[in-house]
Amino acid sequence: MMTRNADETKKIAVDLASTLHGGEVVLLVGDLGAGKTTFVQGLAAALGSTSRVKSPTFAVMNEYTATFGAIRRIVHADLYRFSSADDVRALALDDEHRPDTVIVIEWPNAIAYDFRADHTVIIDHAGGDSREVTIQ
Ligand code: ADP
Ligand code: MG
């Protein structure tokens, strides 16, 4: 889907959020500034989070409370600075999997690691503020 601004990308995230039940993993693939964190903002808001979603590039992992169906928690990781599968294993993301949790991961493609994923969101720059958003 083509979006022309950040709000349109968030709207796609809202639509995806409405299909979630808890226990899912969502991967976000795209260059710096593509709109991965913007997408997570739309997703988190739709899941009832009132937290300010920022790129957890320095924190690596942030957690937000949620209230949507059985979903009570969003775990948001950004692996931009990771360089190896060992870094991913050390983060122990698998330990965060719970039926009440949605895990979203920015930059999963930076590392050769086989992430379990229910949805992969690919965001590509398409000139100016346009983005091509693909959900697999
Ligand atoms: P990433 O996390 O992929 O590095 P961010 O979501 O942090 O990217 O930043 C994307 C930037 O691009 C934001 O400033 C956002 O407002 C802007 N932007 C402009 N057009 C769009 C669009 N169509 N979709 C998403 N973000 C957009
Ligand atoms: Mg980001």
Image (spheres, rainbow, N blue to C red):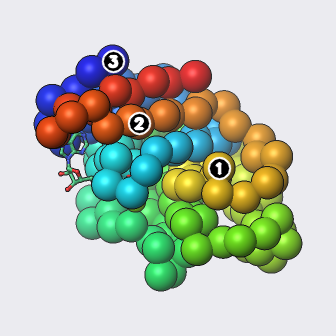
Q: Which mark is residue 79?
A: none
Residue 43 location, quadrant: top left
Q: Residues within 10 Å of mark 3 (few under 14, many from 20)?
A: few
Q: Secondary structure at mark 2?
A: strand
Which amino acid type is shown beneath numbered disc 1? Asn
Q: Are marks 1 and 2 in contact (CB under 8 Å)?
A: no
Query: Please, what is the three-letter code of the amino acid marked with disc 2?
Result: Ile
Helix, strand or loop at disc 3?
Answer: loop
User: What residue did someone put label 2 on?
Assistant: 123
Residue 120 in the figure: left or right of residue 89: left
Would residue 86 be found to the left or right of residue 15 on screen?
A: right
For mark 3, what is the residue?
A: 1
Q: Earlier in the sequence, mark 1 or mark 2?
A: 1
Q: Residue furthest front?
A: 127
Give residue 109's mark. Answer: 1
The image quadrant where one finds ligand 2 is bottom left
